[in-house]
Image: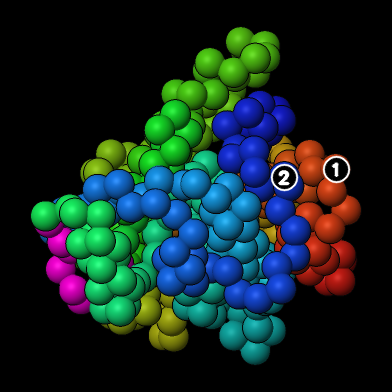
Amino acid sequence: MKHCELFRPLILPGLLRTEVPTDRCDFKNWISSGNYLLRGISSNSVDIEVNNDYAFNHMIAYDSCRMATAAFETMHNIQSSTALPKSIGWIAIKSYYAAFFSAHSIMRCFGYTCSQLEKGHAMQLNGYAQTIGLAQIIKAEAGFFSGVYDRGSRIHRITKMKNTHEDTWATLNECLKKVSRDILMVTGLSVHKQQVSASLTDIVFKLTDKGRLVKGNYLSQFRNAVNYRQEHDLWHPYGKNSIQAEKVVTYLASWKDVEDMSTAIWKESLEAYNFFVACRDVVNLNYLLIRLVIESSENSSNLYKRWPAKLLNIAAI
């Protein structure tokens, strides 16, 4: 994807000022720390006002960096087997998780979160609510929460969801659709903005399987079919639609490229092709966003420079 610099005004600006934390500062720890103000609560959602930018930005950056690093390392370790040249079952599963980790990293760059909270976190939030006189409480049980930060109100609203993977993809889907609209309003050449917007819309198109799955969980459905039911001819005994693993690995190796790589359609299996292209495109977007944050930050100790950038340098990725 070209012209990624257009994302800069849409990325949370605080990410450029983060530093290496002295301890773990993920979403769960941020909730436990109480470095925020509770502004509203219901049976399935919580409105959190960000009154400590440092704590909030470091939480977002920490989770973004750890997920990006896991994605890049996973892609780097995808290899084919000379003994089993059509064995791509595990290549598909690794590709899925690289894309899944990337989904988490991408959304956080734009202020979205998806995280698991435990029963103790819900009880803590209820305690804060009672302290400030709020009548409602959230159900005191563990759950998966999707969140989005509003820069105007400084409210990060988290909403309880049901399915870890499906709802992660749904959150990324909403994030990409919003960014594809917002990118048209930033400063830049109209033709470049339209190109970036179209590229994001194309990723949404792939994640929704051409609009069939409104939540954008096509990759999750395909992975389940491969992982749990051994479908799509990716495992032995291979079928007529089986693909040479080296062809897949060579294509996936383009995950750091700026140029669009969705042109070399494989004749063996269009569905497998769509899956691997979508995985590659999601990881590629993650990589380009992380690179943008690294290059835009003037702070030499920025967390992105000390974590994902360090991995990329060590592995010569």
Which residue lies under the disc numbered 2?
16
All told, the count of numbered labels is: 2
Q: Residue at x 62, y 68 (%)?
A: 66
Q: Residues within 10 Å of mark 1 (few under 14, many from 20)?
A: few
Of the image marks 1 and 2, the number of the one nearer the N terminus:
2
Q: Residue at x 40, y 59 (%)?
A: 114
Q: Closer to the camera, 165 or 12? A: 12
C-beta proximity under 8 Å, tags 1 and 2: yes
Residue 215: in sight, yes or no? no
- Residue type at numbered disc 1: Glu
Which residue lies under the disc numbered 1?
298
Q: Quadrant of the N terminus?
A: top right
Q: Is residue 187 above or below residue 137?
A: above
Start-end of magenta stretch? 136-144
Q: Residue at x 58, y 69 (%)?
A: 25
SS at mark 2? helix
Q: Position of residue 177 (x, y in %)?
A: 40, 34
Q: Residues within 10 Å of mark 2 (few under 14, many from 20)?
A: many
SS at mark 1? loop
Which colour style is shown? rainbow
Q: Position of residue 294 (x, y in %)?
A: 78, 48
Residue 40: in sight, yes or no? yes
Left or right of 127? Residue 79 is right
Q: Closer to the camera, 17 or 37? A: 37
Q: Position of residue 288 (x, y in %)?
A: 69, 45
- Residue type at numbered disc 2: Leu
